[in-house]
Each structure stands twice: as C-alpha cells, then as structure tokens.
Amino acid sequence: MTPKRSTHSQARPPEPGAVDFRKAIEQAELEGVAREQMTLRLTLRDDSRLKRDRTLALEDISFSDGEMRFLGVKVVAGGITSSSLDRG
C-alpha cells in the first residue's frame, strides 16, 4: 500500500501588514534612527494592502509631491519580493 500524498500546499508565513510596519518604524526610532532617514520598501501587494487598510487613521498615510508616506516614512513600492524597512 502506498501512502497518499497531501493535497494541501505548504502554509505560507503571514504577510506583513500595517501593524508590523508600525512596530518596525517605532523600533528603529527607539534605536535612534530618524523617520526622515527611513524608507519603507514594499512589494506591490503590500503597498496595495496598506493603501486599502480601513483600520488606519487618515493621518497615518499621506500623499504629497508624488510621494507616499506611512507614519512620516517614505514608501517605495515594487521591485522587491519581500517588504522591509530600510533604516537609511
């Protein structure tokens, strides 16, 4: 008798969200990094999710001069496979 193969795909780790990005920014700030030095590099999917997150306060995200900022940190979307906070 041969064992049956599982038809379930491997579970993916949870994708980062606004809460994770906020924690990373706050931690970097506690370690002495100014928000002006940071860049939040997001996948296109995470960028879209952040823009559509209805739990965020209006002042958490801003758009000015063709640039998006989350909690005062510049956001750059695309060109990466995993979102991260660049501390500058």
Image: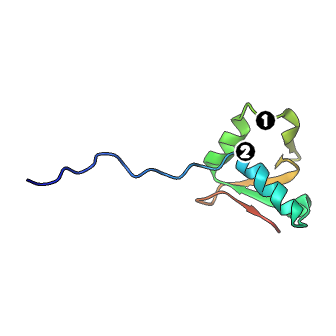
Q: Residue at x 73, y 30 (%)?
A: 54
Disc 1/disc 2 C-alpha distance (Å)? 8 Å
Disc 1 marks a residue whose amino acid type is Leu
Quarter occupied by residue 53: top right
Which x, y percent locates residue 9? 37, 49
Taking 79 as reference, is 70 above or below it? above
- Residue 56 appears left or right of 35: left
Q: Callout 2: few (<14), some (14-19), or many (20+) C-alpha neighbours within 10 Å? A: some
Q: What element carries label 2?
A: helix
Q: Is mark 1 on a helix, strand or loop?
A: loop
Q: Which of 1 and 25 is in front in this view?
A: 1
Disc 2 marks a residue whose amino acid type is Ala
Residue picked out by circle 1? 56
Residue extending furthest top?
Answer: 54
Q: Callout 1: few (<14), some (14-19), or many (20+) C-alpha neighbours within 10 Å? A: few
Which x, y percent locates residue 64? 89, 44
Mark earlier in primary sequence (1, 2): 2
Is the C-beta separation of discs 1 and 2 under 8 Å?
A: yes
Which x, y percent locates residue 78? 65, 55
Q: How is the image coloured?
A: rainbow
Residue 65 image label: none
Which x, y percent locates residue 49? 66, 40
Residue 18 image label: 2
Quarter occupied by residue 52: top right
